[in-house]
Amino acid sequence: MANSLTADVRTATTWSMVLSVLMIGAGVLAITAPMIAGVAVTAIVGWLLVLSGLFHLAFAWGAGRPAAVLWQILIGVLYGAIGFYIIASPVAGLASLTLAIALYLFI
């Protein structure tokens, strides 16, 4: 029992150190090439918006009332359109996301 626990802790510690080194490397790359890092994060946000739009469309059918279904479909289409815009032009999407975050923090 103790040997199994020790092996599990050793495995978890090894993976933790490997992931830490990878994250440090990614951080150094992000500092040295901020435009590439910004575009990469923008692409991830774009894909998350597309995925969120698909989920809104999928869950719209279980919303119950017709008004709720309509709102879920509209939100899903809006999220999908914004996600595709960000994916199609990541530099403009980066500027848009930066402006949106700045407005949010200002308000």
Image (cartoon, rainbow, N blue to C red):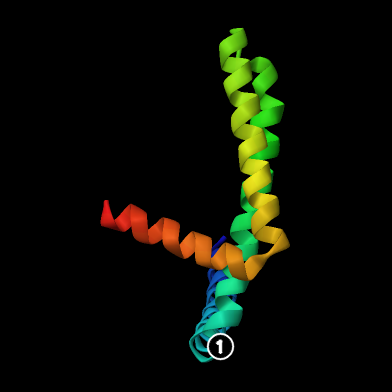
In-front residue for pair 102/29: 102
Please state the total of marks drawn on the protein image.
Answer: 1
The image quadrant that residue 66 belongs to is top right
Q: Dot 1, crowdedness within 10 Å: few (<14), some or many (≥20)?
A: few
- Quadrant the N terminus occupies: bottom right
- Residue underneath mark 1: 33
Which residue is farthest top?
Answer: 65
Residue 27 pos. (x, y %): 50, 82
Q: Residue at x 55, y 64 (%)?
A: 5
Inspect this view and state whether residue 62 appears.
yes
Q: Residue at x 67, y 43 (%)?
A: 80
Given the image, on which type of amino acid does mark 1 rest? Answer: Ala
Residue 40 pos. (x, y %): 62, 71
Q: Residue at x 67, y 44 (%)?
A: 81
In-front residue for pair 13/22: 22
In-front residue for pair 5/13: 13
- Asked if residue 56 lies left or right of residue 99, the reply is right
Which residue is farthest bottom?
Answer: 32
In-front residue for pair 59/46: 46
**Compared with residue 20, is residue 103 higher up or lower down, i.e. above or below?**
above
**Compared with residue 19, is residue 101 higher up or lower down, i.e. above or below?**
above
Inspect this view and state whether residue 4 appears.
no
